[in-house]
Image (tube, rainbow, N blue to C red):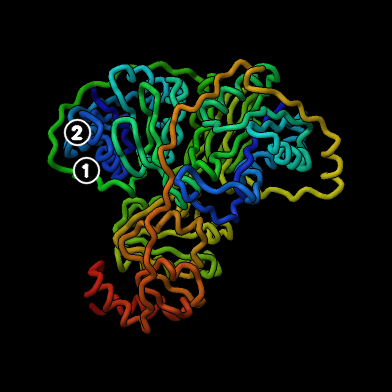
Amino acid sequence: MKLLVPVKRVVDYNVKVRVKADHTGVETANVKMSMNPFDEIAVEEAVRLKEKGAATEIIAVSAGPTACQEQIRTALAMGADRGILIEHDGILEPLAVAKLLKAVIAKESPDLVILGKQAIDDDMNATGQMLAALLGWPQGTYASKVEPADGGIKVTREVDGGLERLQLKLPAIVTTDLRLNEPRYASLPNIMKARKKPIETLKPADLGVDVSPRLTVLKVEEPPKRQAGKKVGSVQELVEKLRNEAKVI
Amino acid sequence: MAVLVLADHDGSAVTQPTRSAVAAASKLGDVTVLVLGPRAAADSAAKVAGVARVLHTEDALYTNGLAEPLAALLVSMAPEYSHLLAPASAAGKNVMPRVAALLDVQVISDIAGVVDADTFVRPIYAGNALATVKSADPKKVITVRAASFDPAAAEGGSAAVEAAPKGEDPGLSSFLGAEIAKSERPELTAAKVVVSGGRAMGSAENFHIIESVADKLGAAVGASRAAVDAGYAPNDHQVGQTGKIVAPDLYIAVGISGAIQHLAGMKDSKVIVAINKDEEAPIFSVADYGLVGDLFKVMPEFEAELAKK
């Protein structure tokens, strides 16, 4: 089974983002960038499938500026075999990314594509489902378990209220939820080895994809701030306040 | 032009997040609600204030909400509608991006506000910023953040219930089974009161402290991501950027430090109470009422005080 894992370069999850003074977006200059955490889980799952002998090759793909090579190298250091960078400066919405990935998939013919369920920058939660739609493939989103079974794959999904299990025909799309696995840290020898693994660079035009955004960001603002309230001295005081001041119990 | 809302239901009635999606849809046009499941759920949708029409089918193809046939059905219905909406539930978030891609439009996820027919407000970066976006697509496909819209009233409407069109089965996936927790407590995203525990709970067994206070208040039980990661609570209890977004009248955070990730999921609650032994915990900066103390001492006292009336 050949696997393809898209990875996104995002503002590191530990960074407290700041809205730009001109309200055009959030500050990304001189901010630590990392691989989207859900994509790390996707890479980890692919590497585990390969270690179990269920997969033969893992291709890590990233779309964005040249610096996305860093995130591809991280995936390579975790265990991916080679990388593809689709170089583009400017906004790439999930629909555009799905179209780019579809074009790469037409060349590479993977059996399974594993994506993070959501990127922690735009929080769209969409690329996996959109890619599945464009390819006409089944989708197993929010996966907490992925097992090759009966010539396809069995996916356990996190849904409201519990879990559900689906059987998907291959080729298929899986998106990862938090509990699927705990991603490994790349070892130094593997980081060194990753430097020698190949990364192919493409442009959207090479793939014949129009990536023009469909959404225009009119403004980005800080959410209304909540004022810190007061400390109460005792449980009795708390219950009294909730009953008579806030009137919520 | 008409607006279509895909309903979530519990077998007998549409969910409160669905009624929030109806409230958002009402700002855009005449609302048609699509109900896939028992007739009782369709009848409940017909009574929701502001619903003009209900389309209903009990076709077994949609019983388990498989994304592929459901998206195909929505796409076949799309020509009649300017906007297609669903609550931003696990089901809605699963299917609507698929619908959008099939229609060659960019999905607009998790909207928190409607500015006009093309323009919407949505949280980004875990709710640390709000983006106002204008869509150039001819049709909009949207999921709605329930906590941001007061739900349409469950009673007051009298829409006609008609048969939904028949769709095709692409036959790509099949449903094997589910383990859905049965609970007497209200659903997390619809509860008026939520009591959540964090890593300081220390164990899954200790969560009964949260549960018994929740039961006194008729509340839902939530958890921080740290508590879920530690295995103290199931993932569907998770409140936060990567879990559920809630906005109850009262949110009680117990032993939760208040990571940005968690705040993103509950900071729109009307009244927030924080109980934590670390007086520097960030949760106190958003709490209306803070109580510094050991939760294992405070919570039994709290429960006893609630019982007093």
Taking depth in this image into account, of B30 and A249 the one nearest to the observer is B30
Q: Residue furthest front?
A: A22
The structure residue drawn at horizontal position 33% and vertical position 28%, both measured from the top left corner, is B84
Q: Position of residue B24 (x, y in %)?
A: 28, 39
A106 and A20: which one is in front?
A20
Viewport quadrant of the N terminus of chain A: top right
The numbered dot on residue B51 is: 2
Residue B51 x/y as whole percent: 19, 33
Q: Residues within 10 Å of mark 1 (few under 14, many from 20)?
A: many
* Residue on which the image places disc 1: B152
Q: Quadrant of residue B270?
A: bottom left
Camera-side residue: A97 or A156? Answer: A97
Closer to us: A246 or A11: A11
Tag 1 or tag 2, which sits nearer the N-term? Answer: 2
Residue A207 horizontal/vertical position (percent) = 64, 17
At mark 1, the secondary structure is loop
Cβ–Cβ under 8 Å for marks 2 and 1: yes
Instruction: Residue at 34%, 23% (x, y): give it.
Output: B59
**Residue B173 visible to the viewer:** no
In the image, what residue occupies the spot 37% across and 41% down?
Answer: B121
Q: Residues within 10 Å of mark 2 (few under 14, many from 20)?
A: many
Q: Is residue A114 left or right of residue B85?
A: right
Say whether residue B205 is left or right of residue A198: left
Is residue B192 something that shows in the picture? yes
Q: Quick check: A114 above or below A137?
A: below
Q: Chain of mark 2?
A: B
